[in-house]
Image (cartoon, rainbow, N blue to C red):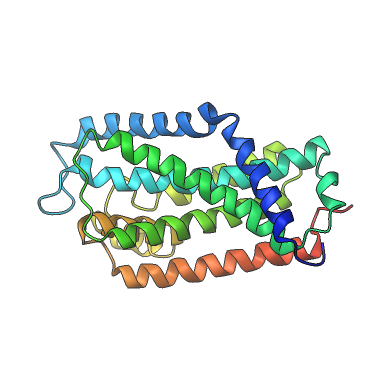
């Protein structure tokens, strides 16, 4: 895994993109449908009872959270599932004999994960926009947090895929770490509606800053400053990426 091959990284990236494209009904359409169901259920039940920001209907408030949740979950799912499947089926050996560097592995797996996450997020946004006219007060914040969030979860999926040796270990990682951090990040509510203790807990969750910063791009307001969110998300992305690169460089659980 020494040396750098941009051509090799591009080939691996293309392979990873084709992997989820070939089953796009499952990898893209299904998550979009899930997000729409969340919107229909929560929006119908709470629309007349909850208003988080002045002048913003609850359905409008909910849409950015669902979009970002879809981006994060699908970016993680792409890189993690690809690695664990390759390890279990044994075809990872074909990559191990190549001269690809750890940077090439990282850029290909994380790049493909980001693409899937962003495609799903765009699909969710396109469909849910029919239920509430979209507002984009600061589109640049939307783009920045979508890209950073997808990149961080793609790198985290890479770590999970390297660590896990069985599908149940991967399921545990997703169910006990990714899902709780996602659902407790303010997707369906503002953290200001929580008791002080749980507000403090929420501010320890980097997913909260991704959701809040992303939502700020739509409404121009949020629970914290977007610059604070950017600092937290940027630092988290660099940390997770550094860990993933170090594990790839050392061949962690790749060679036995």
Q: List the single residue furthest toward the front.
A: 7
Image position, residue 5 (x, y; %) = 75, 61
Q: Residue at x 14, y 39 (%)?
A: 49
Q: List the single residue furthest toward the top.
A: 25
Regarding residue 205, the answer to whether it shows in the image is no
Image position, residue 94 (x, y; %) = 84, 45
Relative depth, front residue between 178 and 31: 31
| 12 displayed left or right of 32 | right
Using the rendered view, name the quadrant where residue 238 is placed.
Answer: bottom right
Image position, residue 61 (x, y; %) = 23, 47
Image position, residue 241 (x, y; %) = 61, 64
| 62 displayed left or right of 68 | left
Using the rendered view, name the quadrant where residue 209 is placed.
Answer: bottom left
Relative depth, front residue between 117 and 63: 117
Of the 4 image quadrants, the one containing the N terminus is bottom right
Using the rendered view, name the quadrant where residue 208 is placed.
Answer: bottom left
Q: Residue at x 22, y 33 (%)?
A: 131
Regarding residue 182, the answer to whether it shows in the image is yes
């Amino acid at each position: 895994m020494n040396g750098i091959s941009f051509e090799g990284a591009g080939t691996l990236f293309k392979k990873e993109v084709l992997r989820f494209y070939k089953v796009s009904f499952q990898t893209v359409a299904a998550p979009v449908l899930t997000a729409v169901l969340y919107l229909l259920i929560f929006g119908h039940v709470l629309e007349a009872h909850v208003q988080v920001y002045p002048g913003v209907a609850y359905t409008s408030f909910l849409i950015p959270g669902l979009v970002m949740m879809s981006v994060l979950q699908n970016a993680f799912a792409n890189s993690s599932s690809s690695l664990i499947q390759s390890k279990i089926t044994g075809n990872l050996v074909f990559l191990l004999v190549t001269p690809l560097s750890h940077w090439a592995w990282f850029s290909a797996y994380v790049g493909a994960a980001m693409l899937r996450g962003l495609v799903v997020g765009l699909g969710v946004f396109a469909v849910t926009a029919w239920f509430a006219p979209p507002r984009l007060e600061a589109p640049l914040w939307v783009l920045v947090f979508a890209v950073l969030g997808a990149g961080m979860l793609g790198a985290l999926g890479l770590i999970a895929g390297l660590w896990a040796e069985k599908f149940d270990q991967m399921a545990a990682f997703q169910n006990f770490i990714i899902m709780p951090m996602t659902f407790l990040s303010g997707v369906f509510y503002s953290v200001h509606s929580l008791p002080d203790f749980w507000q403090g807990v929420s501010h320890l969750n980097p997913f909260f800053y991704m959701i809040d910063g992303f939502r700020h791009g739509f409404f121009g307001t949020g629970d914290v400053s977007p610059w604070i969110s950017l600092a937290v998300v940027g630092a988290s992305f660099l940390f997770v990426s550094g860990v993933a690169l170090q594990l790839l460089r050392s061949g962690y659980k790749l060679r036995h």
